Image (tube, rainbow, N blue to C red):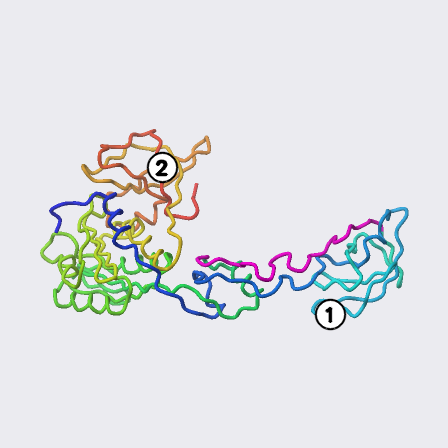
Amino acid sequence: MFRRLTSFDEAKRVINEKLKLPVLGVEEVPLLEAYNRVLGEKVVSTLDIPPFNRSIVDGYAVKAEDTFGAEENQPAKLAVRGVVSVGEPPEVKVGKGESAEIVTGAPIPEGADAVVMVEDTDRDGDELRVFRAVTRDGNIMKQGTDIKKGETALEAGRVLGSSEIGVLAALGLTMVKVFKVPVVAVLSTGAEVTEPGKELPAGKIYDINAYSLSTAVRKSGGKPVYLGVVPDDEVALRNALERALASADVVMTSGGVSVGPHDLTPQIVNSLGEPGVLLSGIAVKPGKPTTVALVGKKPVFSMPGHPTSALLLFHLLARPVIQRMAGRPTTEAKTVKAVAAARMFSAKGRRTFVMVTLKQNKRNGFVAEPVATGASGAITTLAKADGYLEIPANHQFVDAGEEVVVSLLKDTLVS
């Protein structure tokens, strides 16, 4: 199925066009389970936040006009009529020439229109001396200042972090509607692959891809379900893929997509339903054997067995699809400009992605140095890399000292 390689740009176009799938619907979950989920509907406030005028300092509730002209040598003198505590309606009223002791967060008592900070006062029994004037509404958070009743507090599509969860809690919500999470079935193929936790026979390796891809799925907003290792057997692989399609919204495989006698995945996937394989073989390095299919309305991504290739092509092609199905914004990798530390060659006729580490130079810029490995199967390649740079298919190399753009794989850079 590799008679014609699809260009990288054409592969992205096909995926964006054919796999432009809608979100999977909305479900209601408890607020404490909504973290990192995507809000499924607009949330309109049913109350003012705060629901009352409240003090933002410890001090004394006063009438602002009673403090006008107050200074160190000529303090305003007010009578203290009581105390206002947090969580209780005020029982005291403030009249002319009066004040009430108040703490941060407590409601403003009737008659008061400002709060003077305790640092600007001195008290002797029930007499308060104020050494600095305060203006009307000074040190008061007014009712509805944060969120007004009827105002949109959060728009649909917002990813719910700790701050957003706090907003929903402030509105008194215990349940929230969120987009459903796409379930992604992840399985590995190959006679040489063994599941972690089992004894490692001679000539075999542990299943790297299922775990790295599952983690990438989770970070993209999906729910990975590991279906284990499937041998290079047509009947076993077909049965496993049918189970995966029946139980998940997306299927992610690795291995079995090259041109060897046991590489059966593209042919079997293509036979499972229309429209079948959309592309099989992409003009990129690493990751040429990558196959993408659509069975009914379910995407199937079949990645190469090499760990670096599989994870890189996931980020480049599969991640945006999962993000869209989860209702998340599709995010491009952040980029930085750097200077190439050495000459880096492309694979003739293929867009080449070179893994690099970034170091700061003396001018506080970055130098991109290729990761010291030529084996796309080395999982440490991505672990060591800060990002990757692209060499177009029609370019032979990037020269040392040339300015390059590095797409970041990590949230932080190590200088």
Q: Amino acid at mark 1?
A: Pro
* Residue matched to label 2: 405
Marks 1 and 2 in Cβ contact (< 8 Å): no
Task: Pick the residue in front: 359 or 154.
Answer: 154
Residue at the image point whose x is 12% and y is 65% from the top: 233
Is residue 140 found inside the magenta-colored segment of the image?
yes
Drawn side of residue 88 relative to residue 223, left or right: right
The percent coordinates of residue 361 (x first, y second) are: 43, 33
Q: Amino acid at mark 2?
A: Val
Q: Residue furthest left?
A: 261
Report the side of 59 relative to 26 (left or right).
right
Region rendered in magenta? 131-158
Q: Residue at x 77, y 66 (%)?
A: 84
The disc placed on residue 106 is none
- Asked whether, in this view, residue 123 is left or right of residue 4, the answer is right
Q: Is residue 191 magenta?
A: no
The quarter holding residue 344 reads top left
Q: Which residue is mark 1?
A: 89
Place of residue 307 in the rendered image (x, y in percent of width and height, measured from the top left): 26, 53
Measured in 3D between alpha carbons, the distance from the residue under mark 1 to the one under mark 2, in whole angstroms, is 60 Å
**Residue 172 drawn above or below residue 308:** below
Which of labels 1 and 2 is toward the front? 1
